[in-house]
Image (cartoon, helix red, strand yellow):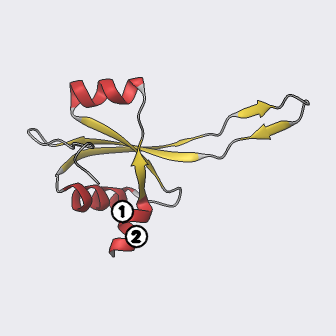
């Protein structure tokens, strides 16, 4: 896989309370990924971009929420895809050093 596709697959880390607890307790990190990304592509992208070994990978599609505007119109936010990546023991990703 070429470098352009690596950066197109991983859109960025997903930071929430749940993802923070998972990273602290289970060595598991959460990423926003492209809708057309497959599990093998996500695994390869994480391993090459962060120089780590992926132990387990779970991918899910998050449905966009429906919101009502102040004028009563209904809008739907976009769907997106999330990946939970568990690293092998002794490895970690430090997002503060990336840049």
Across and down, in percent, residue 8 comes to 44, 64
Q: Is residue 43 above or below residue 66?
A: below
Farthest-out residue, right:
71
Across and down, in percent, residue 12 comes to 41, 49
Name the disc covering residue 20, or none: none
- Mark sitting earlier along the chain (1/2): 2
The picture quadrant where one finds residue 28 is top left
Residue that badge 1 annotates: 41
Q: Are marks 1 and 2 in contact (CB under 8 Å)?
A: yes
The picture quadrant where one finds residue 68 is top right
Q: Residue visible at 10% across and 38% down? A: 89
Q: Residue visible at 12% across and 43% down? A: 91
Under tag 1, what secondary structure? helix
The picture quadrant where one finds residue 59 is top left
Farthest-out residue, left:
90
Across and down, in percent, residue 51 comes to 17, 57
Inter-mark Cα distance, 1 to 2: 9 Å
Q: Residue visible at 65% across and 39% down? A: 64
Q: Is residue 53 above or below residue 14?
A: below
Q: In the picture, which quadrant includes the C terminus?
A: bottom left
Under tag 2, what secondary structure? helix
Residue that badge 2 annotates: 5
Q: Is residue 77 left or right of residue 2?
A: right
Q: Residues within 10 Å of mark 2 (few under 14, many from 20)?
A: few
């Amino acid at each position: 896989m070429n470098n352009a596709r690596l950066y197109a697959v991983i859109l960025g880390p997903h930071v929430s309370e749940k993802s923070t607890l998972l990273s602290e307790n289970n060595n598991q990190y959460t990423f926003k990924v492209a809708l057309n990304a497959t599990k093998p592509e996500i695994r390869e992208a994480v391993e090459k971009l962060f120089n780590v070994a992926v132990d387990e990978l779970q991918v899910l599609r998050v449905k966009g929420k429906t919101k009502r505007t102040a004028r009563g119109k209904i809008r739907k936010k976009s769907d997106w895809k999330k990946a939970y990546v568990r690293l092998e023991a002794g490895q970690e990703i430090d997002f503060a050093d990336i840049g």
